[in-house]
Each structure stands twice: as structure tokens, then as C-alpha cells.
Amino acid sequence: MAEREKLLEIKNLKQYFNVGKPNMVKAIDGISFDIYKGETLGLVGESGCGKSTTGRTIIRLYNATDGEVIFDGENVHGTKNRKQLKDFNRKMQMIFQDPYASLNPRLKVMDIIAEGIDIHGLAKTPKERAERVYSLLETVGLNREHANRYPHEFSGGQRQRIGIARALAVKPEFIIADEPISALDVSIQAQVVNLLKKLQIEHGLTYLFIAHDLSMVKYISDRIGVMYFGKLVELAPSDDLYSNPIHPYTQSLLSAIPLPDPESERIRKRIIYNPNIHNYSENDDVKMREVRPGHFVNCSEKEVKQYQQLYKQ
Amino acid sequence: MENILEVKDLNISFHTFSGEVQAIRGVNFELKKGETLAIVGESGSGKSVTTKAIMRLLPPQNSEIKSGEILFDGKDLAHLSEKKMQKVRGKDISLIFQDPMTSLNPTIKVGKQIMEPIIKHQNASKSEAKKRTLELLSMVGIPNPEQRFEQYPHQFSGGMRQRVVIAIALACNPKVLIADEPTTALDVTIQAQILELMKELQKKIDTSIIFITHDLGVVANVADRVAVMYAGKIVEIGTVDEIFYNPQHPYTWGLISSMPSLDSTEEELYAIPGTPPNLLHPPVGDAFAPRNEYAMQIDLEEQPPMFKVSDTHYAATWLLHPDAPKVEPPAAVAKRMKQFQAGQEGQ
């Protein structure tokens, strides 16, 4: 795992809102993680824990308060000239949660998808532009006749496919998917997730997949980060996180998911998380520590030993 | 067990500019005393329309109950006058809406909103109503009821607001509680709390619940019986074990296999191809046939009737006809069925 190439490094990222005012919010409070090339990193947590803000700060929709986001060896934040910014915008794209709000209702699908192509001058002739849009539509499972329609003529699942086609239009390397399936029906969710997986293999994409549906996240992600109140509390390969959750918050989150299995639902016991159980004192150095290879937990030095002991059993 | 609510051959249409949309096409079910019936299905399958029809909350301008009966307490709710209906709503049957952010009035204090149905339906005095409201607030697990009584909805979090909505719904000890996706807008941890609360309260006041959701995990958690809806019809109905461990309809198979389980390792998720039909022009045969890999010629020509699987379990698919060929359900479903049969033989 160590030799894998890092595509994105996030170092001690902080995003505060209303700085200096009494209602200051620490939406992200110092998180660090890496995303490797070609992997899917899932980010889960309750609403308000800062997972969407993390995605938006990474893509520079917000200016970070502090910390660094290094993409492909370059810092995302900080001054850039037009050309650099444009170049960066092409490499990183986003898929939004609500397919009803994220497409301009007054543009035809052709122009929605081609917007990025026009900005970056990726097509030289109108014919080439149309050809590219057609092939993108086919890639995401729609057909070329759809190019001349407006968004309202499509169902939720189809709109999300248009959103995906738009993100792919500029040939990005990295896609941030912010709850891309939450607004869709169960039977359609599976279609979109399968599409995202297929595209990842075909185009060598890297995903940051933000969601609160934990079973879907586990299915699509290679590694999963769990966030709680602006902090990352646990980061581990997905199977490891589900079979051996270490941080008490992760345990509580996992125990709250209802499974489509009445037998196991009857015996399920929910674990309740109480942040006071850590009982951190002033001089405890609480940070992400590696409890076992690849499995990081936010804890103090004392807890690390406890956790490692537990793990052995 | 006695039936508290019976829906018989309900047909509902909406009149739109493009024509008549047949949203509900012959729905039959009954609700027993003290049970939880879950209705599952995709958006547009008619689950919310069914429950709104029971409450008679469909817009009179463009909707029409074409035929059918909704029997409750000796009355046919489908043909009750608005005045009589007002005595049923909130008293005998009450509704919990999906979005706790929009179902409370932002300009009225929470306490007053809970008191309203008590004063209206039980002729209680203000002080009696207040006493009852404080009881309700603590019953649904809201700390400091006296202080919370005087607060406005915006001072409550999403989970707390949904508790207020539940308190309003339970204010008059309804016989039937309809919960329309009550936890969809909430986080998993809050969802778990609300589901536990609803189950606990159901035991306490012995009410029947119709629970609408599209989350099969939630269904497995709360339901005694499950009805699966597709394109305005109930395609399968049975006890929760029958639906999850012995499903018969291909649409139910599809729903169950398209949910990833936490221990699944399959490379590709099963996805039901295509999209639901447009009910402006409902298909002639089985509405699911175009998306159904098991569809036969007859599925395109004639609608399947409800076939009986057991006393409690019915499904509308031609596959259950004695002349139909035997088919193998998808792997994920077959595995469930096998595990269940093994478990039953073990008992």
C-alpha cells in the first residue's frame, strides 16, 4: 500500500465560518488524510459533521481557513493565475446531491454537458462538440436523442446521469461525489452506483464519495473516513472498519443502521455514544494514530494501547 | 385479530393537463388492531396517495376517488363529508409527515401546536390541555418540557421536531397512526431513536401504524406485515418474514437484491433496469413486465390477479400460476430463502 501514488494530500485542513463573530462555527477542525490514485474514499457522518464542507473546501468552493490541500503535488488554495486555475478546475470535478437543483433548467442537455468543453476549448468544431456530448451520453447510459431536451423532461436517476456526464466532459482525474444517490429511489441508486464503478475502471478515476447511507458507502469505497463534529475520528479500509470499528462513535454509528433482515433486527442492540467517555485531560495529545497498519483512530496515547489490546482479542 | 381499517378496491385518478393519471389502480388491504403495516415502493408508486386518500387530504380540484371503499369504524371514509372527516382527522387517525422542518407552523409556539388537537377533539380546558401536553412532551423524550412548551419550532433540532410532530399525532390517542417516511430526513442515529420511540409508544397506547418508507432496513426493523407497491398496485403483501425470506414477486426480488448488505462482497450490485411506467398510459398487462427479466407473454397481455401463497401472503405475478414454468430467483434472494428454510426446519 505504501508505494501507491498519492493524488491528494490534505494536511490539517480547517474551515471556520463567521470568523471573529460570536457565532463562529468550526465546520472542519483540523483534518488530515490522503487519497491515493484510483481509489474511492468514502466520507460518512451525521448531518452537520462537516463532510460536505470538506468536499467543498477541497474543490475550492470555500477558501480554507488554515491547512493545505495538495493535489498532484500542487497546493489547491493560494493565489493562482487564470491559466493555473483553469487547469486545476479541469482536473477536479464535482457531482452534486440534488439532481433537481444542480442542472440549469433553461439550458438543453447538450449545452449543460458542453459547458466545460467550451470553457476549456476541448472541442474545435461544433461537430466535434456534439460528437463528444453524444459519446458522453452513451457512456452514462442515455442516448443521443436526449441531447436536445431540457432537464425537466428527465427522471431523477436520468438527471443524475446527466450530472455525471457533465463532470466527465472535461476528462477529470478526481471527482467529488457529494451524496450523489441520496435523492434517488432504491432501485435507481443501484444503477447509479454501478455506473460510477464502471466509469472508475474505464477512466481511471479517483473518487471522494460523501454519503450518510453507510451500506452504500461500504459497497463503493476502498477506504472510509468517519467524521464527527468537524474532526475525522477513524479512517480504515472499508472491510476493516465494518468488521472492527474501534472508535466508540464509529461503533455507535454502525449499530444504528437498520439492516434489511428482520431476524437480525429483532436482536439488534444500539450502542449510544457519549463523548465524555474519553475523559481527555488538558495535556493529552489527541490525534490520529495508527492502531494497526492502515487503520487510523483519533485518540490519546493511553487509548491507543487499549485499542491495540482490544484488537488482538 | 380484528380489522380496524379496510381498504377495498380503491381507484384514484388525478386530472392533469396531459390527461388522467391513474395513480392508484385497485388497492386492497386491511390493517389489524395493534399491528404495524409497512408500505414500500418507489416514488410515484402510490404509497403516499393511498394514505392521503385515507385521510382525505388529496386536493379536491384535480383528484378523484373513482371507486372503492375505505372502511373505518363502520364508516366509509371515501364518501364522508368534509365536516365529519374533520372529526376523524387527528382524533381517530393521525398522520406524521416526512419532513419535520416544514410540517410545524414556524410562527406558533410548540406547546400551542400540541394543545390544538386536544382542545379541538376532547373539549378540554386550556389548563387540562397544557397538563396533557407536558405529559406528551416528556413521553416522546423531550427534556425540560415546561421550558420547551414556550419555544418555537426553529429552536428545535430535526430529531426533536419530529418528536414534537409525533406528540401532536398521538395527542388524542388515535386508533390509527399513519407515518409517511417519518425518518427519511433524519440521520441514522436519530432515525434509530425515533423508531425505538414509535415502537415503545405503540405498545403503550395500542395503536395501529401504517408505516410508509422506501428503506428496507427500516421495514425489517418496524413492520409486522409488509405491502409492496408498484405503479399504483399492491404487488405483494405478507408478514415481514414472508416478504424478506420468501418473496415471490420479481419486483420484490429486485428491491431486495439491489440493497447492498453490510457483509456483501459481490462485485456488481443488482439493479432493476429501466424506470417505472408512466401512469398517464398504464400498460395493458403487468406494469412491471418491461423491467422484468422473468416476464412471459401473458404478462404483456393480462394483469395478474393476487395469487395466494399462504394465509397471510399474496403476490400478483403470473409466475405463481400452476401452468407457469419454475424460475430460479436471483442469487441474493435464493440465499435468503435457503437460510430461512434451514432455520425453520431447525425449529
Image (cartoon, coloured by chain):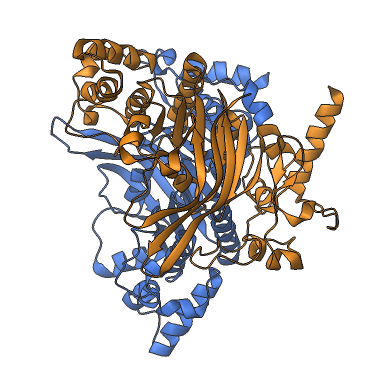
Chain colours: A blue, B orange
The percent position of residue B191, horizontal first and vertical second, equals 46, 30
Give the residue drawn at x 25%, y 15%. Answer: B124
Give the residue drawn at x 46%, y 76%. Answer: A146
| Quadrant for the C terminus of chain A in the image | top right
Tag count in the figure?
0
The percent position of residue A123, horizontal first and vertical second, equals 40, 83
Position of residue B121 in the picture relative to residue B107 (left or right): right
| Quadrant for the N terminus of chain A in the image | top right
Give the residue drawn at x 71%, y 36%. Answer: B242
Q: Quadrant of residue B284?
A: bottom right
Position of residue A144 in the picture relative to residue B126 (left or right): right
Give the residue drawn at x 26%, y 10%. Answer: B131
Position of residue B309 in the picture relative to residue A153 (left or right): right
Viewer-side residue, B80 vs A203? B80
The percent position of residue B30, horizontal first and vertical second, equals 58, 35
The percent position of residue A311, horizontal first and vertical second, equals 63, 22
Viewer-side residue, A21 vs B246? B246
Residue B100 visible in rendering: no
Residue B186 visible in rendering: yes
Viewer-side residue, B60 vs A90? B60
Q: Quadrant of residue B287?
A: bottom right
Viewer-side residue, B202 vs A243? B202
Where is B89 relative to A206, above or below? Answer: above
Q: Residue furthest left?
A: A21
